[in-house]
Image (spheres, rainbow, N blue to C red):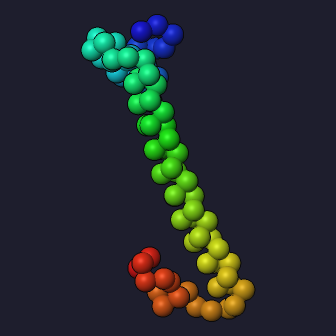
């Protein structure tokens, strides 16, 4: 585990990644499966981040709309599925 100070957060991340890759290689998993699994993890994380962005963006929009209308912010203004 060169390149990083032993037991640093970077060292641990690299060690975990190495162990995961070693496990795939030791189990003789084909490279297409390895690539597919990595992409699946990255895409899932990206989708979750985008959903969180949309949620935050909607909240900001609602605050702007309420500020423009001078309405109090209440649960009655929120959609039922968001309560």
Q: Nearer the viewer, residue 44 or 78?
A: 44
Instruction: Name the quadrant of the N terminus.
Output: top left
On the image, the x and y values in percent for residue 3 come to 51, 10
Residue at point 53% right, 88% down? 77
Instruction: Answer yes or no: is residue 67 visible.
Output: yes
The answer to whether 11 is drawn above or below residue 75 in the figure is: above
Q: Quadrant of residue 12?
A: top left
The answer to whether 41 is drawn above or below residue 68 in the figure is: above
On the image, the x and y values in percent for residue 4 come to 48, 14
The answer to whether 50 is drawn above or below residue 64 in the figure is: above
Residue at point 51% right, 50% down? 47
The answer to whether 36 is drawn above or below residue 20 in the figure is: below
Q: In the picture provided, is 16 more to the left or to the right than 38?
A: left
Instruction: Report the number of discs.
Output: 0
Residue at point 57% right, 58% down? 53
Instruction: Answer yes or no: is residue 9 visible.
Output: no
Instruction: Name the quadrant of the C terminus.
Output: bottom left
Residue furthest out toward the top? 2
Residue furthest out toward the left? 27
On the image, the x and y values in percent for residue 51 come to 52, 58
Q: Nearer the viewer, residue 61 or 36?
A: 36
Residue at point 53% right, 65% down? 55
On the image, the x and y values in percent for residue 74 come to 50, 88
Residue furthest out toward the right? 68
């Amino acid at each position: 585990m060169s390149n990083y100070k032993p037991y640093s957060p970077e060292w641990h991340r690299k060690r975990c990644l190495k162990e995961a890759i070693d496990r795939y290689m030791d189990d003789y998993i084909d490279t297409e499966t390895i690539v597919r699994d990595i992409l699946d993890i990255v895409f899932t994380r990206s989708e979750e981040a985008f959903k969180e962005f949309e949620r935050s963006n909607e909240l900001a929009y609602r605050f702007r709309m309420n500020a423009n209308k001078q309405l109090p912010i209440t649960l009655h203004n929120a959609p039922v599925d968001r309560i």
